[in-house]
Image (spheres, rainbow, N blue to C red):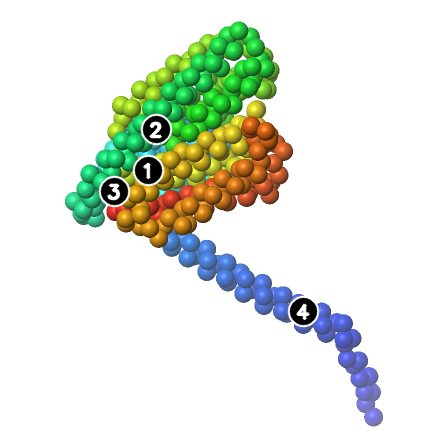
């Protein structure tokens, strides 16, 4: 009789469960991989018209772009060793920008462009600029013909001009006091006067940031210069902030304070000399709030020496509130349904900042937790999104 093999014992229950679990994990992983692949493919399809621009340490590639008029998307990839900004400029005016693009990362910038020739920045402020040519299309020609009457916007724009004038005057006065404290060598007084001067600038920032070179002189951070804080071109508010709060030394600072006073005086002249198109009244505020939400609130880098970020955010909120106030009569007539959301987001952002009030000012930003910073960023983004609905409602989108 042939030898029979002994019957095999059935695998232990734990082993059977382990095998079954492995199969489930493999199936689930496969499903997730397929889903991720489909999402990536969909994203690539949605973004197939993105224009890729790569920032290198001393140039951008390509440095000559051409796109059709209308909405365009640019993916900016930072291959340099520091955070950079990227701007589209129409002469001295900023059309669109993105700040603080981290090394090795990319950001997408969407811009609604009219036909014409523009310049683009390529990383460091000392780098050569590139060019952007925007060609006319049938849609852009039709949009130009369908442009709404500007008569309705005369009042809000005139009142905004008055606002800019009064705020610029307040800025000059505040910087004058700051310059005098620096000149007399009073460090404590200069530190105290830096805050109201900075807040005065932030109430003008959405409009001031339209002037590329002037805003860079007044407001550029050290990151955007080759030698950072030691770069001779590093001037303006943050040069004073660095000396007042980091070095705590006023030696040699008077010429920088005098230059800042001269620049904010020129800023007032430029704000009043340049006509603001109605389609930019809201968009400049939206861009400012988006930058606050995307970068400035989370990183805290803008006021890195004084940690007075909340003071600056409050100034930005004042500017947004003013624009809503000026456009409210038009919105009541044409888009009243937008006002509850706009008012709620204004109130919510204001309440968020007021939660950090200390006496007559705000808490130091280095005491604000990462979770709280995200909440501030979210409130700023929500307000930007609410305001972004105004232009289409007033017939200004696509201009």
Q: CA distance from mark 2 to mark 4?
A: 67 Å
Q: Are marks 3 and 2 in contact (CB under 8 Å)?
A: no
Q: How packed is label 2: few (under 14 Cα within 10 Å), some, or many (20 or more)?
A: some
Q: Are marks 2 and 4 in contact (CB under 8 Å)?
A: no
Q: In front of the other: label 3 or label 2?
A: 2
Mark 2 and mark 4 lie on one chain; the one further toward the N terminus is 4
Mark 3 and mark 1 lie on one chain; the one further toward the N terminus is 1
Q: How packed is label 1: few (under 14 Cα within 10 Å), some, or many (20 or more)?
A: some
Q: In front of the other: label 4 or label 1?
A: 1
Q: Are marks 1 and 2 in contact (CB under 8 Å)?
A: yes
Considering depth in this image, is 74 or 8 the residue closer to the camera? 74
Considering depth in this image, is 129 or 26 the residue closer to the camera? 129
Please give the label number shown on residue 399.
3
- Check the picture and name the quadrant holding the C terminus: top left
Judged from the image, the secondary structure of the residue bearing numbered disc 2 is helix
**Is residue 158 something one can see in this rendering?**
yes
Q: CA distance from mark 4 to mark 1?
A: 63 Å
| Residue hosting label 2 | 163
Judged from the image, the secondary structure of the residue bearing numbered disc 3 is loop
Residue 204 lies in quadrant:
top left
């Amino acid at each position: 009789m042939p030898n029979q093999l002994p019957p095999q014992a059935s695998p232990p229950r734990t082993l059977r469960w382990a095998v079954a679990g492995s199969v489930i994990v493999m199936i689930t992983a496969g499903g997730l991989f397929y889903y991720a692949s489909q999402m990536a493919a969909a994203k690539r399809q949605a973004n197939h018209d993105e224009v890729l621009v790569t920032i290198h340490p001393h140039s951008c590639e390509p440095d000559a772009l051409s796109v059709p008029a209308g909405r365009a998307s640019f993916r900016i990839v930072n291959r340099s060793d520091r955070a950079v900004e990227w701007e589209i400029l129409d002469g001295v005016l900023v059309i669109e920008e993105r700040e603080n693009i981290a090394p090795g990362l990319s950001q997408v910038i969407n811009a609604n462009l009219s036909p014409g020739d523009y310049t683009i920045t390529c990383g460091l402020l000392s780098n050569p600029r590139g060019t952007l040519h925007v060609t006319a299309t049938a849609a852009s020609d039709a949009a130009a013909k369908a442009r709404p009457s500007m008569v309705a916007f005369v009042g809000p724009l005139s009142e905004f001009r008055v606002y800019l004038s009064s705020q610029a005057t307040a800025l000059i006065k505040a910087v004058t006091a700051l310059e005098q404290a620096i000149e007399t060598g009073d460090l404590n007084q200069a530190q105290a006067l830096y805050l109201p001067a900075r807040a005065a600038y932030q109430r003008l920032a959405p409009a001031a940031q339209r002037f590329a070179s002037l805003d860079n002189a007044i407001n550029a951070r050290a990151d955007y210069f080759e030698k950072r804080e030691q770069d001779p071109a590093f001037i303006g508010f943050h040069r004073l902030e660095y000396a007042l709060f980091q070095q705590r030394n006023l030696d040699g600072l008077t010429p920088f304070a005098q230059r800042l006073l001269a620049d904010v005086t020129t800023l007032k002249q430029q704000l009043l000399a340049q006509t603001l198109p109605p389609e930019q009244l809201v968009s400049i505020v939206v861009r400012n709030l988006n930058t606050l939400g995307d970068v400035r609130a989370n990183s805290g880098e803008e006021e890195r020496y004084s940690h007075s970020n909340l003071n600056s955010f409050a100034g930005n909120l004042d500017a947004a509130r003013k624009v809503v106030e000026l456009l409210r009569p038009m919105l009541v007539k044409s888009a009243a349904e937008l006002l509850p959301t706009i008012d709620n987001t204004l109130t919510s952002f204001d309440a968020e900042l007021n939660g950090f009030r200390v006496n007559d000012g705000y808490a130091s930003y280095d005491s604000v937790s990462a979770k709280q910073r995200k909440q501030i960023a979210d409130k700023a983004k929500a307000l930007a999104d609410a305001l972004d609905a105004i232009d289409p409602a007033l017939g200004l989108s696509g201009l």
